[in-house]
Image (spheres, rainbow, N blue to C red):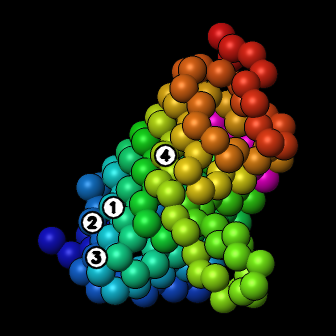
């Protein structure tokens, strides 16, 4: 089976850079001006019915892993950068301009320039059946349980454990149950 049997290219200007490090479990729809970069020994797994909209960037760094579950829709201008591992469950909706990363700069040594201290990664996990609103940042080590709504402009920096919550703010906190 060829990758072209599963990917529907909606428009021109798609950039894909990968070898055999991509696994597709069903049809994937990719819109225009999408960049998917998978470095050496990195893996990208896409579930069934994944929809990647315009101007989205997916960058899986060397040795890292990204899993996007079934029936997920990435809004336009989303960016996912993976240094170690990001897991995104099934049935998630991402509005435009969402940023997800599992990495951050080291900065603890005052005698070394921050730009020379390297990066550190911490697994980032997004459960299933979530709505991530416009402009949300989900950062290194964040955990989002199932059934949550992440309010627009929120910055998620920690682990949340209660399902079906509205989460929002800078930094984000639980606001109320969504039910």
Instruction: Decide: few, some or many residues near mark 4? Use Cα within 10 Å; few <14, some 14-19, many ≥20.
Output: many
**Which residue corresponds to the image point at 55% horizontal and 61% vertical from the top-left?**
102
What residue sits right under mark 2 in the picture?
23
Which portion, as a residue range, is magenta? 130-136
Name the side, left or right, on which 151 lies relative to 164.
right
- Which residue is situated farthest in the left direction here? 1
**Which residue corresponds to the image point at 69% horizontal and 14% vertical from the top-left?**
177
Residue 164 among those drawn in magenta: no
Residues tagged 2 and 1 counted as in contact (Cβ below 8 A): yes
What residue sits right under mark 3 in the picture?
21
CA distance separating discs 2 and 1: 5 Å
Q: Is residue 71 visible?
A: no
Q: Is residue 18 above or below residue 31?
A: below
CA distance separating discs 4 and 2: 19 Å
- Looking at the image, tell me whether mark 4 or mark 3 is earlier in sequence order: 3
What residue sits right under mark 4 in the picture?
125
């Amino acid at each position: 089976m060829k990758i072209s049997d599963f990917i529907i290219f909606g428009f021109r200007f798609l950039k894909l850079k990968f070898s055999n490090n991509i696994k597709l479990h069903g049809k994937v729809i990719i819109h225009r001006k999408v960049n998917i970069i998978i470095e050496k020994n990195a893996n990208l797994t896409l579930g069934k019915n994944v929809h990647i909209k315009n101007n989205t960037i997916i960058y899986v760094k060397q040795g890292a892993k990204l899993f996007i579950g079934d029936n997920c829709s990435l809004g336009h201008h989303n960016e996912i950068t993976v240094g170690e591992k990001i897991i995104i469950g099934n049935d998630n909706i991402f509005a435009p301009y969402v940023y997800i990363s599992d990495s951050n700069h080291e900065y603890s040594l005052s005698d070394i320039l921050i730009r020379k201290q390297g990066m550190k990664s911490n697994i980032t996990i997004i459960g299933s059946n979530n709505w991530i609103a416009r402009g949300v940042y989900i950062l290194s080590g964040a955990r989002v349980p199932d059934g949550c709504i992440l309010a627009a402009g929120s910055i998620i920096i920690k682990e949340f454990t209660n399902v079906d919550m509205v989460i929002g703010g800078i930094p984000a906190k639980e606001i109320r149950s969504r039910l």
